[in-house]
Image (cartoon, rainbow, N blue to C red):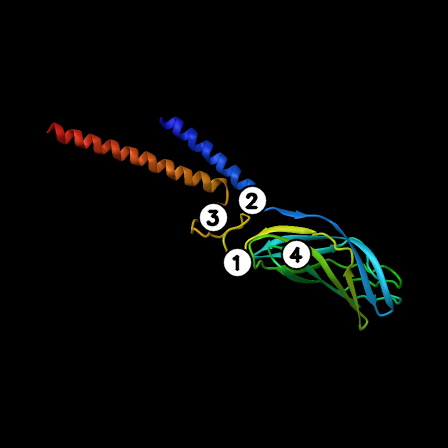
């Protein structure tokens, strides 16, 4: 194969390898789900429906999760002054992993009038994968503490996951394209540049081997002529 044809073949292989890596990149699938909360309050039971979404940002070996409410839930018969209400919640894991992630956030930054739906600030928490694979994240129980009382709101409509991620457990095999060496000990391939470098190195090895072979043949012919 000529040098030009070899170069074209290596470039094509690099492009295909790069495309394969991009197709195999980990996907985060997020959606907004309606959660029908049944709340047990100090003054009786209440219900409210709020659209909720969960977002993630890679952070070290884990993920920073943010849970957001688009509508208020429950209410108070009296005004809640600034800083009087403290929310927290759980996110239920499914798929490859199990358990819950606790999320919390700041107290209300402004007074909440009486008999007004309580708007929950964004709640955040950290998830560190224990298993490798696709993990789902579903809104769980919401807890509101205010004026020495506790209100517990439980989803009653079995909402679907608001987020799914392809994750890799720390120290586990590479799954979903998330770093780390695989079980065979090979190094991860993180992008088209790596593919091009690897293929370029292979091409260089072939060229060097060819040059060495030509040199050996030349030296052999010279010895034979002597």
Between the residue at mark 1 and the residue at mark 2, the CA separation in whole angstroms equals 18 Å
Vertical position of residue 222 compared to residue 20: above or below: above
Q: Do callouts 1 and 2 mark residues in contact (Cβ within 8 Å)?
A: no
Between the residue at mark 4 and the residue at mark 1, the CA separation in whole angstroms equals 18 Å
Question: Which mark sits nearer the N-terminus, 2 or 4?
Answer: 2
- Where on the picture, by quarter, is residue 112? bottom right
Asked if residue 214 lies left or right of residue 189, the reply is: left
Vertical position of residue 183 compared to residue 42: above or below: above
Between the residue at mark 3 and the residue at mark 4, the CA separation in whole angstroms equals 26 Å
Task: Give the residue at mark 2.
Answer: 25
Q: Do callouts 3 and 4 mark residues in contact (Cβ within 8 Å)?
A: no
Residue 75 appears in the figure: no
Question: Which mark sits nearer the N-terminus, 4 or 1?
Answer: 4
Q: Do callouts 3 and 2 mark residues in contact (Cβ within 8 Å)?
A: no
Q: Do callouts 4 and 1 mark residues in contact (Cβ within 8 Å)?
A: no
In the picture, the disc for residue 65 is 4
Q: Position of residue 157 (x, y in %)?
A: 78, 55
Residue 132 appears in the figure: yes
Task: Give the residue at mark 1.
Answer: 170
Q: Residues within 10 Å of mark 4 (few under 14, many from 20)?
A: many
């Amino acid at each position: 194969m000529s040098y030009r044809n070899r170069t074209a073949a290596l470039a094509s292989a690099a492009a295909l390898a790069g495309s394969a890596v991009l197709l195999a990149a980990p996907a985060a699938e997020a959606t907004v789900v309606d959660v029908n909360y049944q709340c047990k309050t100090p003054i009786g039971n209440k219900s409210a429906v709020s659209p909720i979404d969960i977002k993630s940002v890679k952070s070290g070996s884990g993920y920073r999760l943010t849970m957001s409410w688009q509508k208020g839930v429950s209410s108070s018969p009296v005004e809640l002054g600034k800083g009087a209400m403290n929310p927290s919640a759980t996110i239920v894991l499914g798929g490859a992993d199990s358990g819950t992630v606790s999320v919390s956030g700041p107290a209300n930054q402004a007074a909440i009038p009486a008999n007004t739906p309580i708007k929950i600030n964004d709640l955040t928490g950290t998830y560190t994968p224990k298993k490798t694979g696709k993990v789902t994240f579903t809104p769980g129980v919401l807890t509101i503490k205010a004026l020495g009382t506790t209100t517990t709101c439980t989803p009653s409509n079995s909402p679907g996951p608001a987020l799914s991620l392809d994750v890799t457990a720390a120290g586990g095999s590479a799954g979903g394209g998330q770093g780390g060496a695989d079980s065979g000990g090979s190094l991860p391939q993180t992008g088209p540049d790596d593919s091009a470098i690897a293929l370029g190195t292979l091409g260089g090895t072939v060229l060097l081997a060819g040059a060495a072979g030509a040199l050996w043949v030349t030296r052999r012919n010279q010895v034979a002529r002597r």
